[in-house]
Amino acid sequence: MNDNSLYDGILRDLSSGEFQSLDRRSQTLQDIFMHLEIGTTTTAFSLIPKLDDLEYEQNRAEIAKLAGVRPSALDKLRRQDEKQKNEGKLQGRALSLPEPVPAPEPQDGAKLLDDIAAQIRRFVAADVVSIDAIMLWIVFAHIAQKAPVCPNLVFSSAVKACGKSTALDVVSRLVPKPLSVSNISVAALFRTVELLSPTLLIDEADAMFRQNDDLRTLVNAGFTKSAAQVVRIVGDDNEPRLFTVYAPKAIALIGSLPDTIESRSVIIRMRRRLPDEPIERLRSDRDQGFQPLLARIARWTLDNADEILAQEPEIDPSLSDRQADVWRELLRIADFAGCNWPQRARIAALELCAKQTDEGDLGIRLLVDIQRIFSEQPDRQKWPTQTIANELNALDDAAWSEFNAGRGIRPNKISRILTHFDIKPTTIREGNKTAKGYLVDAFAEAFLRYLPQKGNNVTNTTNYLQDNGIKCYEKVTVTFPKSNIQNDGQLFDSTGEAFEERPTFTNDDLAIVGRVFEQLVESEKARTGGNTVGICIAAWRLASAVKGVSFGVFDAAKAYYDKLGYLKEKRGYVQLTA
């Protein structure tokens, strides 16, 4: 007699001869099947984590079939229960980022922006345009999740001890859900952003981006909301899942960011504070007025986010497409706040973009210096690549001589960079010798496309400038006088009397300054509906700088116009006298 027959006989005896099969399933498993049969599925699911691993694996498929779910759903139930049991055993602490509590009363936008800028100025030594840019970005962080793009805020300096970390600390106290990270993995970044939508504060980013190309790629992808997502495989079933990497990011570093990140950023150049630039010490043990201001920002953006994002700000045509994308979101805020903030924001955009334009792009720097070399020898049309390399390495104010461990930039490096601009070397002949090199004409299109261009000459026979991007006008009347610069460089006023000073500017410079003024006048007329408008001198100066006129040359050209008596100036604004 085998063991099963013995057990069956015992069962018959205990049941008065009626046979009952032995149910070897645990009571928990029996209860699960019972609840599934009577339809109390929730109770059945609550019992699944109580099964031991072996019994669960043997009955997993049958339970899932009766419940009408995939087996992976049951696996998830067990993992969640295990996670809760192990919560107290995990290293670190649970990540929780508090939401700012909005102020109880509505806020006046212009007054709020004034107060934020004043608060930043208490602790950060920076110029006015930088303070304004920081302030606008802080407010933007509160509506970033609704915006189509998310520019970064970057504090950079040449050396340490320039106030970058302090500035980052100030920002952290005024943005929603700040999360400071000095080092973060790619996996941690996209999972944190997906779960919590924080404002990321990244210090010492120079080391971080240098060591992690994947992280740099993810930060790049986080600029445009529609593209700010990554795909990762998760779970036992290797299911592909989407994770967002869209979040406002404030970054501090020594040196420069990779070009692709810098072009998506508002760059604040930090410098060491001078003795006559007093600021308050930022303390970690005191609030110093930040919480009430944070609550006011939260209330204003909560009340007005949709209206702010509905603004269509006017963008200065001198900004590149990428710069326009970055600043459009900040200009929306300034335009909605009103008062003098639309003008202040545009001045900040022009000045900061003028500092930033192409300075970090190796290819653009190469084009700028080659154009400079060509201009010093205008009669030469053929340039061997080695000769270009020698000229570049001889430039005292450029870094080409530091390439290749101090041996200077090589011809093959020049060729590789220029290939990106579709400029290719050819064989050129000089005397009896041939060498690989370039024709000057091969650079013409690249110079036009990538380098700032000065305007066309203004002749002495017309006072019209052809339209150069001003809408609704075929010609724009230049109400400035003719330049009156003779071939020998002598200046004359409107009565024909000679000025004593020799000019420090050209007809081209005067044309650009005049054109910019007319563009600003027409823009302001269109905005206000008035016939007589004043133009902010700072905006005029910065817009001219973007067009290639240095501040010094602008000041000289404006002084020339002042002496001619065609301008009247008051409190930083200027109008034509007639």
Image (tube, helix red, strand yellow):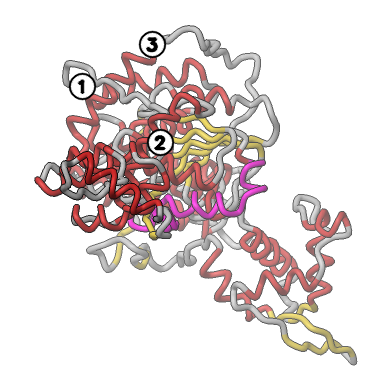
Residue picked out by circle 3: 289
Q: Quadrant of residue 125?
A: top right
Residue picked out by circle 2: 82
Q: What element does badge 3 sit on? A: loop
Residue 166 spot, x, y in % from top left: 55, 22
Name which residue lies at 53% across and 60% down.
452
Q: What element does badge 1 sit on? A: loop
Q: Could you tell me how far apart the alpha carbons at marks 3 and 1 are, in whole angstroms?
A: 17 Å
Tag 1: amino acid: Gln
Q: Nearer the viewer, residue 114 or 92?
A: 92
Residue picked out by circle 1: 107
Q: Could you tell me how far apart the alpha carbons at marks 3 and 2 are, in whole angstroms?
A: 44 Å
Going from N to C along the chain, the mark reached first, 3 or 1, is 1
Tag 2: amino acid: Glu
Q: Nearer the viewer, residue 572 or 14?
A: 14
Going from N to C along the chain, the mark reached first, 3 or 2, is 2
Name which residue lies at 41% across and 29% down.
85
Q: Which residues are magenta?
A: 206-234
Name which residue lies at 52% across and 38% down.
154
Name which residue lies at 64% across and 19% down.
274
**Compared to 477, does 250 lie above or below?**
above
Inspect this view and state whether residue 331 appears. no
Going from N to C along the chain, the mark reached first, 1 or 2, is 2
Tag 3: amino acid: Gly
Q: Is residue 233 magenta?
A: yes
Residue 275 spot, x, y in % from top left: 65, 14
Q: Is residue 536 left or right of residue 215?
A: left
Residue 82 spot, x, y in % from top left: 40, 36
**Compared to 565, does 167 lie above or below?**
above
